[in-house]
Image: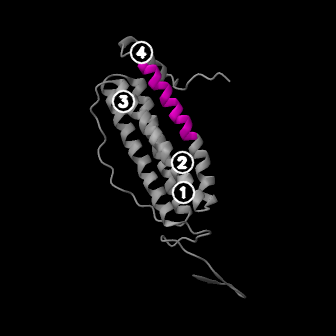
Amino acid sequence: MTVSTSSTSVNVSLGPAGRALAQPIESALVDALQQHLTMERKASVFYFALSIWFAERELRGFSEFFKMESQSEQVHAGNFADYLIARGQTVLLEDISAPRQDWSSIEEIMSFSFQMEADVTSSLHQLYSLAERSSDMRTTVFLDPTIEEQVQSEHQFAHLLGRIKYAQNQPSAMLIIDGELSQGISQPAKVA
């Protein structure tokens, strides 16, 4: 595209969405960002299903915790969509299938959730590595705070899984944890 002013003309690169591009982005990186956006959307749907599962069992603290996690994952997906748009790309939304809704225990749920958080962390690290290999500093800068937040989320789920395992599926212990979650207490202790 050529933009004309009274005395000069400037060539401006455009992305697939027709937006001006300050720096091109490699197609492999765009694909990986799109895949991660889908991963965040799947996590949101999964956590929403868990919120319902816990609400059906009268565990309002767990239900509220997973509802907030669902909303957080939706924000993360939105951040990736915003970043792709800022880089002149078209955001492609893939179909999201229905999440698993049958669980045998809270420990099974927390184990699965922890593993999902670990997978999201791995995906972010792979994105970062791909951005570095592409010399795409804009993407590494975008990913830095996202990775830090994700590591904290993984730490939180490891903590909750540890508490659930320690409770050994004892109803009174689960109700104590549920009460703490109702009060917004879900972070591990800090020793520093």
Disc 1 and disc 3 in contact, CB within 8 angstroms: no
Q: Give the percent coordinates (x, y) of residue 190.
A: 62, 23
Earlier in the chain: of badge 3 and badge 2, it is: 3
In three-dimensional space, the C-alpha distance between marks 1 and 3, rounded to whole angstroms, equals 31 Å
| Upstream in sequence: badge 1 or badge 3 | 3
Distance CA(mark 2)–CA(mark 4): 33 Å
Determine the secondary structure under disc 3.
Answer: helix
Residue at left offset 33%, top offset 54%: 95
Residue 25 percent across, percent down from the top left: 55, 66
User: Few, some or many C-alpha atoms within 10 Å of disc 2 (few <14, some 14-19, many ≥20)?
Assistant: some
The tag earlier along the polypeptide, 3 or 4, is 3
Q: Position of residue 141 (x, y in %)?
A: 63, 53
* Residue wearing tag 4: 167
The Cα atoms of the two marked residues, 1 and 2, are separated by 9 Å
Nearest to the eye among marks 1 and 3: give it. 1
Which comes before the other along the chain, label 1 or label 4?
1
Identified at 55% across, 26% down, the residue is: 187
How far apart are the two marked residues, 3 and 2, measured between alpha carbons? 24 Å
What residue is at 26 percent from the left and 32 percent from the top?
Answer: 102
Which mark is in front, 3 or 2? 2
Q: Is residue 72 left or right of residue 142?
A: left
Q: Secondary structure at mark 1?
A: helix
| Amino acid type at image mark 4 | Ala
Q: Amino acid at mark 2?
A: His
* Numbered range of the magenta stretch: 149-165
